[in-house]
Amino acid sequence: NGEHHFPFGGVHFNFADGAPVTADEMGRIVDLAGRSVMPPTEQLLLRDSRAALARGQYRRSVVDAGTAMEMSLYEILEEICSTDRSPIADQYLRLASKWTLGKLIENLANVCQLPPGLAPEAVRLRNQVVHKTAYEPTEEEATEWLKLATATAELVSSTAGTLPISKT
């Protein structure tokens, strides 16, 4: 089944989930860990969301993934505005700090290419979970939401400085 458990001092590592790590990636991981470099907060939240999903805590998974998504989207907005350091861009960032997740998605969709499926109406699930009588999402809903949040965070990390900004 692909599971390998390596016990180290009572801690068990399960390498059955996720994509294989290349030798170069492992070297980078070891280098960063050796220098005590912490992953970005949104990556830690995605890790927590995956763990909650695996434990059947779908509500917690959606909340953590949604928080990671919001942080990633705001980082995208900051990147866009950093290309035009002007009073207007600064004012735009100040206004954006008060936007809801749906409003942030709506505005960013007008200026850059977001992951497929990420639209203002996509936040319905997150809003139900956070604001509406503690809605308990299904495993499928939580899985799809985590995929969207992960794609959003990957957009930030894989395109740093080269965000696909539309000219429309």
Image: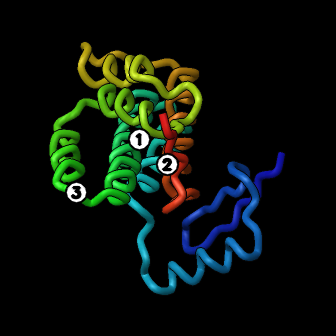
Residue 155 % position (x, y)? 54, 49
What kind of element bears circle 1? helix
Q: Residue 123 versus residue 26: which sits nearer the camera?
A: 123
Q: Earlier in the sequence, mark 1 or mark 3?
A: 1
Cβ–Cβ below 8 Å for labels 2 and 1? Answer: yes
Q: Residue at x 32, y 34 (%)?
A: 104
Q: Earlier in the sequence, mark 2 or mark 1?
A: 1
> Dot 1 surroundings within 10 Å: few (below 14), some, or many (20 or more)?
many
Q: Amino acid at mark 1?
A: Met
Q: Residue at x 40, y 52 (%)?
A: 42
Rounded to the nearest whole Å, what is the CA distance between mark 2 and mark 3?
26 Å
Residue 95 % position (x, y)? 16, 40
Q: Earlier in the sequence, mark 2 or mark 3?
A: 3
Q: Which disc, if any, is residue 69?
A: 1
Depicted 100 relative to depicted 15: above or below: above
Depicted 139 relative to depicted 38: above or below: above
Q: Can residue 55 be seen?
A: no
Q: Amino acid at mark 3?
A: Ser
Q: Amino acid at mark 2?
A: Ala
Rendering quarter of residue 70: top left
Quadrant holding the N terminus: top right
Q: How is the image coloured?
A: rainbow
What kind of element bears circle 3? loop
Q: Can residue 39 be seen?
A: yes
Residue, far right:
1
Rounded to the nearest whole Å, what is the CA distance between mark 1 and mark 3?
26 Å
Residue 153 % position (x, y)? 49, 48
Q: Residue at label 3?
A: 86
Q: Residue at x 52, y 21 (%)?
A: 141
- Horizontal relation, residue 15 to residue 158: left or right: right
What kind of element bears circle 2? helix
Q: Residue at label 2?
A: 153
